Amino acid sequence: MSSPTVIGFLGFTGLVGSSILPHLLEFNEQGKIKLIILHREGSDLSKIPEGIDKRLIDLSENGKDLNKKAVEGLEVVLSTVSGEALKAQTYLVDALEGSPTLKSFVHSDFGTNWTPKELEAPGLTIIGVKEEVVKHAEEKGVPLTHVRVGAFDVYVFKFRAAGTDLQTNVVQEFRNSLKNPLRITSIPFLGYATAQLLLFPDSLAGQTYQVYDYQPTGQELIDVLTKLNGSKPQITQFTEKEYQEGIKVPGVGAILSAIKAKWGDDNWGPERNLPEFKDWQTKSLEEFVGDWKAKL
């Protein structure tokens, strides 16, 4: 019987990380993996059970020796950090360089597929930070795995990222969005799928996984909202002027404008390429949207 895969996990408290953590804790309990929590000084470890190995890291110039020791013996390293910590992953890459056990570093991507042309937009400079981490890892010879997603369900339905408002029964149209699919990644599915992928460490290096579980067209969203609300939603327009203005200023607004363009142009990139997950039951679109409507 082979030994369980040793997985180091950094960034377990955020939106993405907290969706993956319960699955990895379960796999650790079942003996499928040996989970090791990588954490920074002051991290909240209250959700990490006793018996789980915890290793301190320092993602700065001062952490070289500490980080090298922290990653000893790790076969897979998963990072789901965000914000300023994204760029600091380069220090983790430095620690992983030359590791005799590492099979892959699953860096904190968890974004959509962006083309070089799209990244020319002034408002999308934040995406370039992830590319810097990738380039650094490639230069250091650290094997990478990329996890790409659609628009997160919480952003689509709670924060109306694509212009769909479940409460006021509104669907926003931009370019050909009524005919084109909107890729949606539900956070529960992302957590489940990512954890499942880690069970196959020898297959990870060099892979880019497209993780999403729904892709309704704008018209399909209109049809579902008509059923749920008993009346056809109002269709509003997102204009080209709003789009051009939106992608100028770095921040969330620029990313949301760019996502609307991806939907309108059907420019999502490669299709879903995940193995079959027999234990995951995907709800119908009507049930999925209905559940979100009930939460709001």
Image: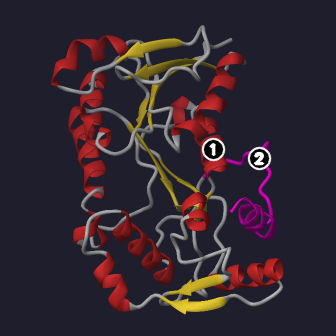
Q: Is residue 194 left or right of residue 168?
A: left
Q: Name the residue carrying label 2.
A: 280
Q: Is residue 93 left or right of residue 175?
A: left
Q: Is residue 113 above or below residue 102?
A: below
Circle 2 residues within 10 Å: few <14, some 14–19, many ≥20? few
Tell me what residue is drawn at x 72 percent, y 59 percent: 295
State yes or no: residue 121 in magenta: no
Q: Quadrant of residue 84?
A: top left
Does residue 199 show up? Answer: no
Span highlighted in magenta in the image: 274-296
The residue type indicated by label 2 comes to: Trp
Tell me what residue is drawn at x 42 percent, y 62 percent: 113
User: Which badge, 2 or 1, comes first in the chain's sequence?
Assistant: 1
Residue at the extreme left: 61
The CA span between labels 2 and 1 is: 9 Å
The residue type indicated by label 1 comes to: Ala
Give how far across and how far down residue 221 sits, in percent: 69, 79
Q: Is residue 46 above or below residue 211?
A: above
